[in-house]
Amino acid sequence: MTTTAGHQAPQTEHPPATEHAGATVELTGLRRRFGATQALDGFTLTLQPGELVALLGPSGCGKTTALRVLAGFETVDSGRIVVDGVDQSRIPAQRRDMGMVFQSYSLFPNMTALDNVAFGLRMRKVSSQERRARALEQLDLVGLAPEAAKYPHQMSGGQQQRVALARALAIEPRVLLLDEPLSALDAKVRVQLREQIRVLQTRLKITTLFVTHDQEEALSMADRVCVMRSGQIEQVDTPSTLYSAPATPFVAEFVGTMNRIPGVITDDGRVSLLGTVVDIRTAVVGSGFGGNAVIASGTPVDVLVRPEGLAVTPSPEGRGIVMTTTFLGSITRLGVLLDQDVMVYADLSNSAVAVPTGSAVEVTLTERSVMVADRTESGGPVAAPLEVPASDD
Amino acid sequence: MVALIESPTVFDLEDRLARPRRPWSRVRLRNIAWWRGIVLVLTGAFFLVPLFAALRFSLQNFAGGLTFSAYTAIPSQLGFTAALSLSVRLAAVTTGITLGLMVPTSVYVHLRLPRLRPVFDSITIIPIVIPPVVLIVGVLQVAPTFLKSTPYLLALEYTILAMPFVYRSLDAGLRAIDLKTLVEASRSLGGGWRSTLWRVIVPNLRTGILSATVLTIALVLGEFTMASLDLYQTVPVWIYQFAQDDGHVSTAVSLLALLVTWVVLMVISSLDLRRIRKMAETRRGA
């Protein structure tokens, strides 16, 4: 990973930081209820040493609760939290050795950046001379040594979060916990800081749990992404697997942009949509598609297709009308209204012919096999690959 | 016949905004400003005229001329030094007890019992509505025996009396900081509760604590009823009793007490004002 031009690259310009042996974290069967809300419902996740796992999900899915439980700020109704084989359930937060960076600016306003970073070392009774040296080293690591004497209110949001990161790293934590640390920052600073966090985390080999609701952050930073919904894990996988082979319709639609296009199962076990018939690559299992059951002919299904899986060509007889065009840098995303009020999004290379809003277009599939989901089901537990022979249709 | 009611449109709004302001609205504004001035002058007169009258009286000799003899005679007056010493000691002890009790309590309520905050708001108002006699009797019921025969019993009574003001000052201070995050940040770095309170919360609650201190000192230095009922001679009680012997000296002491209290409060307030100004300057410069 590289850093943005003009932004200091810690791996080349700063003194080597202490490497920590990452810890193994096992969260098993965590349950936590707040009144009527089941924040965690049998949450089980293992983090390997030095791994960065992102907890991704919509607001209220329980991701922050999971992080706070690991940090020791929340208790669980049941379940085990084990770090390097030691049960943490009865260990208070201040003795867990976990560095944490918070969503809101959490620097102590009455202390300078240096004192903030040295705070954890002071609590560990490190001598003042060593404390100062180590704090300066950590500030140098995040490129803020010249700002050591500044108070939080004299620093920008991005600088404050970098100091918060340095503060969390200064205590050489066994586990680094990041609770949406970038959400309050502007887009450019966010990208810079997430790269910096990833570089430091990889270099220091600290086991890291990172909470975010921003899928771009999760996919770009994490070794594995854990998608959560209603206190449960929907899928834990590498970012590429999560994108290309989502286990549930929820994951499919939450990660990246996904079109749901109505289709019908044909007699030969394929699916018909947009005037073509293609193979079923995966049936994302809903209530009607249990196990490896063959889907009955004529069953209405939703076909899940990414925007890059659709092609749009201008055609006066086309069945779609371009409703929106969104410039996204290298591509333009078109919003096309099809029959039956179905809205789909398709990516068009900027080198292709421009398609203005309001023009008639033909939308076709570029993929030869697709994922299908139960039309009425919005979520399911697992993905079951269907053994359907390939066809050249 | 059906009445046609047209809802206002954006165009109507634009039209209304484009219209020139009616002159009467300016007249009305000017009237309001004029009445504000009247209220300010009347309020100022209400406070300043008695003070001016007292000052004039304290500086007047029997022949109608000016003299500072009432002020120069204060230190030699019987019982004054003892009363002043007692008031200052009571102010210090009351402030200590009040802050020692109320800072951890307020922090605890904010962190652990935020839903009970309205209940605490109500409870802390009670000392204002309960008569001082009842408070004295209540304190006597629970006060340790060794305190009952000392003037420091008054400190306990003043602590209850100061509670509404102190709680509100601290509450406002705690609302102004992200207490939960600061505490959690401190704990995640290994800070125990004592370190967190002393090194993180108290310094950031400085404004609230200073306000609470100012109010407590002002209350103790000016309280008369409880001290009088408990038969202790604090400065207000001394002033009241001495007024019957020498009205000029008594008035001079009252004015000096007011001035000293005001100066103390200004000094305490300026401690925080200087910090706030410095922060504002650095913000402007950033």
Image: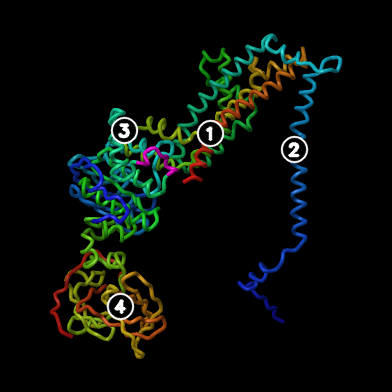
Question: In which chain is the residue bearing label 2?
Answer: B
Q: From mark 4 to mark 3, how far is it between C-alphas?
A: 55 Å
Q: Which residue is mark 3?
A: A132
* Callout 1: SS: helix
Position of residue A227 measured from the top left corner of the image (x, y, whole percent):
27, 59
Q: From mark 2 to mark 4, how far is it between C-alphas?
A: 76 Å
Q: Is-magenta flag for residue B21? A: no
Q: Which residue is mark 1?
A: B272
Q: From mark 2 to mark 3, how far is it between C-alphas?
A: 56 Å
Q: Which residue is mark 4?
A: A351
Lower sequence index among marks 4 and 3: 3
Residue type pointed to by label 3: Arg
Contact? badges 4 and 3 (CB < 8 Å): no
**Magenta-colored span:** A146-154
A65 to A363, vertically: above or below: above
User: Image point 17% across, 83% down: which residue?
Assistant: A268
User: Image point 28% across, 83% down: which residue?
Assistant: A274
Q: From mark 1 to mark 2, how far is it between C-alphas?
A: 28 Å
Q: Which residue is mark 2?
A: B43
Of circles 1 and 4, the one toward us is 4
Residue type pointed to by label 1: Asp
Residue at the right extreme, as displayed: B63
Lower sequence index among marks 1 and 2: 2
**Crowding near pointer 1: few (<14 within 10 Å), some, many (20+)?**
some
* Callout 2: SS: helix
